[in-house]
Amino acid sequence: MADKKTPNSKTIQAGVMGWPVSHSLSPRLHGFWLGQYAIDGTYVPLEVRPEDCRRYITGLPDQGYAGVNVTVPHKEIAAACVDVLDDGARRLSAVNTIVVQPDGSLLGSNTDGFGFMENLISGAPGWALGDGPAVVLGAGGAARAVVAALLEAGVSEVRLANRTVERAQTLAGDIGGAITIIGWDDRSSVLDGAALLVNTTTLGMTGKPPLDLDLEPLPGNAVVNDIVYSPLVTDLLEKAKKRGNPIVDGIGMLLHQARPGFRQWFGVEPEVTDALRAHVLAGVGK
Ligand code: ATR
């Protein structure tokens, strides 16, 4: 694969910074595209300790990087040490994509919300913004990107339920807009009248507790999306599918969020295809 070859001076370098980072599917994902488009480039995992994060990021231009993706736990530090933030990254105070500009300055953006919306649009073409409120479960970093993207797209209301209600309140205060905070115990009853349900919690993920949620009040045509992709079809998606709701799995968010970085570093607009999806899924849990 193209991501395994030895770089020379023409080779475009990119990677993903995290701690730990060995589980990241991004090298597999970008490596597939590098091979598909026959690009002279590398995309490598970069294991960077939190205390080294700032130094590493500011050193990217000198190290010859075109840019990097940034993953847990560095997204917030990255937002604080790039030179320029785009609107999305500023709104979330978190960066997942850094591009080294021609003048050597660092542009930070956040493409998680873009990835979420693109996945939703391609996975549930029948879903329309005006159909009704969205229910979002969870208030972590992923929820921030999802809620901001939905509001920006024009969803009338986001009903936000999180176990720790203060965290949901902080999210709502930071992002602003039509967010209704819901107590965790009311997560089922607020499904009444919703057009979209998104799980952003870790519940239902392999090795985590199950998501205990009664779908009975959810309208039969509401779209259900789980951003968990291990397993790909979570219990939530299984239950939703059984009662006839359209479902959207979580791997597409990962695939689509990678597109803007790849385009800016390597100069090709990459496509999310079934072959890419199968290739990345084969790496889940490895
Ligand atoms: P990420 O940044 O990927 O979204 P995170 O910040 O660890 O991950 O957030 C995980 C989400 O799963 C949070 O909403 C968390 O709820 P709390 O804010 O109350 O911690 C939720 N979560 C994790 N374990 C949970 C559990 N056992 N019950 C309910 N919610 C849980």
Image (cartoon, grey):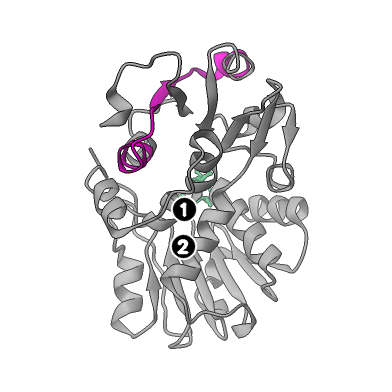
Q: Identify which residue, 218 or 101, lies in the foreground.
A: 101
Residue 243: quarter of image:
bottom left
Q: Quadrant of the N terminus?
A: top left
- Queried on whether the Cβ of the residue with tag 2 lies below 8 angstroms from ligand 1, the answer reads no
Which residue is at a point 52% across and 58% down the rendered structure image?
A: 116
Q: Identify which residue, 198 or 155, lies in the foreground.
A: 155
Q: Identify which residue, 214 or 281, lies in the foreground.
A: 281
Please provide percent x and percent y for residue 279: 25, 47
Please provide percent x and percent y for residue 166: 67, 51
Is residue 5 within the magenta segment?
A: no
Q: How many marks?
A: 2
- Queried on whether the Cβ of the residue with tag 1 lies below 8 angstroms from ligand 1, the answer reads no
Mark identifier at residue 56: none
Indicate the secondary structure of the residue bearing disc 1.
helix
Residue 170 lies, with reference to residue 198, above or below; the image says: above
Residue 129 as seen in the image, left or right of residue 176: left
Callout 2–callout 1 Cβ contact below 8 Å: yes
Residue 117 as seen in the image, left or right of residue 130: left
Residue position for label 2: 119
Amino acid beneath label 1: His
Mark identifier at residue 256: 1
Instruction: Identify the magenta region.
Output: 30-55
Which residue is at a point 36% across and 77% down the rendered structure image?
A: 240
Please provide percent x and percent y for residue 82: 69, 27
| Residue 71 appearing in the image | no
Amino acid beneath label 2: Asn
Q: Quadrant of the C terminus?
A: top left
Q: CA distance from mark 2 to mark 1?
A: 7 Å
- Pointer 2 local density, CA inside 10 Å: few below 14, some 14–19, many at least 20: many
Please provide percent x and percent y for residue 91: 73, 47
- Pointer 1 local density, CA inside 10 Å: few below 14, some 14–19, many at least 20: many
Q: Identify which residue, 194 or 12, lies in the foreground.
A: 12
